[in-house]
Image: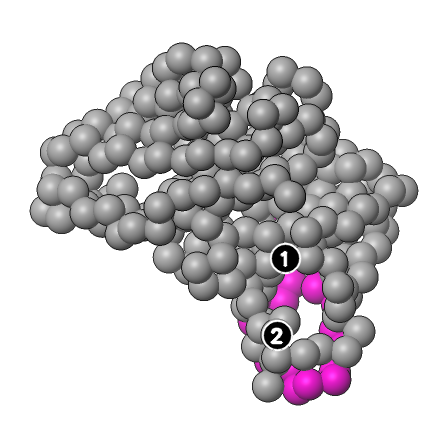
Amino acid sequence: NAGVTQTPKFQVLKTGQSMTLQCAQDMNHNSMYWYRQDPGMGLRLIYYSASEGTTDKGEVPNGYNVSRLNKREFSLRLESAAPSQTSVYFCASSEPFFQETAVEQYFGPGTRLTVT
Amino acid sequence: QKEVEQNSGPLSVPEGAIASLNCTYSDRGSQSFFWYRQYSGKSPELIMFIYSNGDKEDGRFTAQLNKASQYVSLLIRDSQPSDSATYLCAVNSGYSTLTFGKGTMLLVSP
């Protein structure tokens, strides 16, 4: 099992360019997530998909769009990249949370994005 | 806005000592609590989770939860240089998402 995979691993964009970050999981999880991590800021949730066919905004959704293509794949799109979007992007997956349970989120290796 | 607070550190301990990492959270409705470890340049990996008040032990790691004080901690006994990493506290408040703290950097010196 590969777990959670992300492509690309590194990317450099110019301001205004667009790109899509790809994420796939082979653990048959229902929920998938996109985070960004900036120095000293921890992990901040951009968007999530609690189950196939649904997506919701997280803490920092502005400038991003997502697509839950199928149960395995969840992509993140930057329509017009800005230097403020320079970050490390992590995709994660898990089973849905239920009351009084604790479910692990599994993280991909990350994409390091630089916008100049 | 749900908040999870951690001291950024670095927390420096000598090899063999006990490292104590602390986390407070703002949402009294929070139900489950997680500690992730993240090595530099790598993705987070789960160390432990806890959802009942009290202590939970797993090898050298002990998670402690006090819901009345809105406080969760992670103790690492017999700290090793390989434990040097950033430790992220995360809180689930009943929905399908986690709120992460900014992390505490731990440095274990030989």
Is residue A103 visible in the rendered image? The answer is no
Q: Report the residue at 65% width, 63% height from top.
A: A7
- On residue A84, the disc is 2
Say above or below: A11 vs B37. Answer: below
**Label 2: chain letter:** A
x, y percent for residue B49:
48, 25
Whether residue A46 sits left or right of residue A110 in the image: it is right
Q: Report the residue at 29% width, 28% height from top.
A: B75
Along the line of sight, which residue is nearer the eye, B101 or A81? B101
Q: Report the residue at 68% width, 26% height from top.
A: B94
Say whether disc 2 or disc 1 marks the residue closer to the N-terminus.
1
Label 1 sits on what residue type? Gln
- On residue A6, the disc is 1
Please say whether residue A19 is one of the residues in the magenta stretch: yes
Number of callouts: 2
Q: Report the residue at 70% width, 64% height from top.
A: A21
Label 2 sits on what residue type? Ser
Could you say which quadrant of the image residue B29 lies in?
A: top right
